Amino acid sequence: MLWAMLRGQRPWRELHYLSLMPRTRVTAIGEVRPPEQVDFFETRYRQPSTRFVEAGALCWMRDLQQAPADMDWEASLELCSLVTGQVSVQARRRATRQAVLVWANDPDTPLYRLPPYRQAVHRARDADLFLCFVEAARDHCLALGLPAERCAVVHPGVDTALFHPAPKRTREPVAVFVSPVATNKGIDRVLDAWRQVLRHIPDAKLKVVGRGPLDEEVHRAAASDPSITHLGVMPREQVSAALRDSAVFVTAPRATRVWNEQFGLAYVEAMACGLPVVTTVCGSNHEAVVAPNLRVPDDAEALADGLVQLLADPDRGDVIGRLNRSYVEEHFELRRQCVRMGDAFAAVEDGVALA
């Protein structure tokens, strides 16, 4: 399988899943060699503007056609990405099966009305498989008129050996935020809520893991408030340790014009570590965060109330944490989910409709 990477694509996600599918050998093409154990073909990108990022970036590969041609599948991320548009053209020319992996959950996103992205979606319509990571992504595909028999839903998996609970869960009131330090992930809302949390629990602590455009705001908050620690970007192993040393996981995502929360792998990693979750209602994050975790309105007071409930009651946190670990093991275990993804590809190869 050929995997066409987006520029700056995050590791340990889609490519990782594909590489763990049974009987699958993946060659990734991109600018920087990924950490996953796959073959790699280097190429460069053209990116005349940095206005949008990730799948929405105005960015395409210069030499996709130089990638190895002896592939059963060519795959890429998101219908609207310009790289997917390139893969669509090449797969048809080479008579190779094509797969598009989909997180997107909003068929009305303004990106789809812009000519380059509209063209990419149009070119991808003939793909053999639309592998959706959330039910909302399948609904989005169907709303765009894609055939149900080519749309499969397999939730992403989490490495439950890496992300596991501590032998003894902390009883200290420590909350942890693990996400890009950006407005859409709600770090500003978390900081607003935190001031209210401290009125009720003066010895509470907040750890912030990640970086982004609001780094300076977090630095200022940490400099003026000793209860806040900004840990920045950390390797996965250290993220797992930071989660295990905490009592509650918190984020506060809110929609933008071109994005809303699709799933939230950080939720599931925290749940695998036995943490309860407090977050805001956003997009389709209900597919990851289930009761008795707390999904609250996008409001600092509501977020603070949820944090106080769980930080002040470690016994309740213990119960929710155990439920979360069991739920992740049942629904999001990495190897099992990768087998299910492989089953979707095999069904297409065998001519079996997916719906």
Image: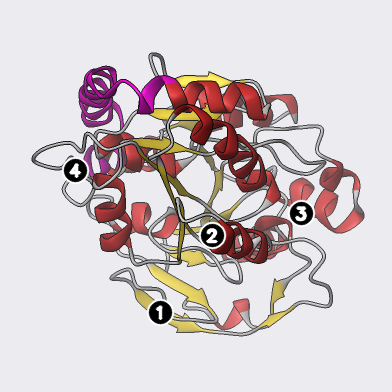
Answer few, some or many: residues within 10 Å of disc 2's Cα (few below 14, many 20 plus, some between 14 and 19). Answer: some
> Looking at the image, is mark 2 or mark 4 earlier in the sequence?
4
- Magenta region, residue range: 309-337
Residue 158 highlighted magenta (yes or no): no
The Cα atoms of the two marked residues, 4 and 1, are separated by 31 Å
> Looking at the image, is mark 2 or mark 3 earlier in the sequence?
3
Answer few, some or many: residues within 10 Å of disc 1's Cα (few below 14, many 20 plus, some between 14 and 19). Answer: some
Quarter of the figure that contains the N terminus: bottom left
The Cα atoms of the two marked residues, 2 and 4, are separated by 28 Å
Q: Nearer the viewer, mark 2 or mark 3?
A: 2
Does residue 288 show up? no
Q: x, y (%) of residue 180?
A: 56, 55
The Cα atoms of the two marked residues, 2 and 3, are separated by 43 Å
Please state which amino acid type lies under the numbered disc 3.
Ala
Q: Nearer the viewer, mark 1 or mark 2?
A: 2
> Looking at the image, is mark 1 or mark 3 earlier in the sequence?
1
Residue at the image point whose x is 54% and y is 65% from the top: 9
Question: Which residue corresponds to mark 3?
Answer: 120
Question: Which residue corresponds to mark 1?
Answer: 40
Does residue 228 show up? yes
Q: Main secondary structure of the magenta part?
A: helix
Q: Considering depth in this image, is 24 or 158 the residue closer to the camera?
A: 158
Please state which amino acid type lies under the numbered disc 2.
Ala
What element does badge 2 sit on? helix
Q: Nearer the viewer, mark 3 or mark 4?
A: 4
Residue 319 highlighted magenta (yes or no): yes
Question: Which residue corresponds to mark 2?
Answer: 222
Q: Are marks 1 and 3 in contact (CB under 8 Å)?
A: no
What element does badge 1 sit on? strand
Is 186 located above or below residue 286 in the figure? below
Specify the label residue 338 is tagged with.
none
Q: Residue furthest left?
A: 167
